[in-house]
Amino acid sequence: MSRMNIELKARKERYHFVIRILLFAFLMVFSYILMLTVSNSTPLPCMLIPCAVCFAMREQPMASAVYGMICGLLLDSAYNMLPGLSAVILMWTALMASLLVNNLLRKNVFNFMWIDAAACFIHGGLHYILYYYVWGYDSDGLILLHIFVPEFLVSNAAGIVLYILTGVITRRFGAINEHYIEERSDDIVRE
């Protein structure tokens, strides 16, 4: 392959990387805005958790940890919580999800569903325990049953749409795979 083709491919891969990251950032901001504008009569879909898990399943571990941390900070802002709890939870969740998918699991919707369910369960469970249960605000478990469980189900179901959308983004702006066919030459002397 000639030097010009290598440079052209590298430039095109950088362009695809920038476009892919911008689209994922737009998806994160859209999920944040969607979380803030949904009415309070319906369960609030926690769209930033599936967004972080989708990114983690598509990208490398360190980039996934940073993206998860940013999603966590936005999630803390959306829930009016102390900044940092969701950031730490989503950073580690995204890192573990990326390592699992890159080393052990295949990228498919079933693996996404259980990883996303685990992330939603961990985040929702810690949120409930640290903000409601410890302080005695919900001794009967009504907040858990009427807010956290529906939020968990809606977030996991809405994550499927995000998974499909991130798959389209990754296929369109992912790594460039080039295939070369060696031409047959009669000038080669075979002994």
Image (cartoon, rainbow, N blue to C red):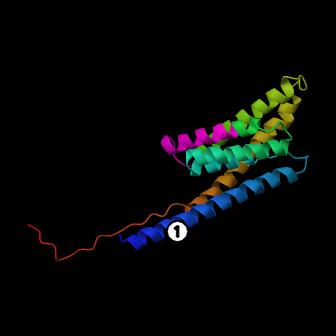
Q: Is residue 143 visible?
A: yes
Q: Is residue 110 visible?
A: no
Q: Residue at x 81, y 54 (%)?
A: 34
Task: Kindly give the residue lying farthest to the left in the view shown.
Answer: 191
Please tell me in which quadrant of the rendered image residue 22 appears: bottom right
Residue receiving disc 1: 12
Query: Relative to 130, is 183 on the left or the right?
Result: left
Q: Residues within 10 Å of mark 1 (few under 14, many from 20)?
A: some
Q: Residue at x 69, y 47 (%)?
A: 50
Q: Main secondary structure of the magenta part?
A: helix
Q: Give the image location of residue 132, x and y in percent.
A: 86, 28
Q: Looking at the picture, tell me which residue is in the foreground, 156 or 36.
A: 36
**Amino acid at the residue labelled 1:** Lys
Q: Residue at x 29, y 70 (%)?
A: 182
Q: Which residues are magenta?
A: 89-108
Q: Give the image location of residue 99, x and y in percent.
A: 54, 41
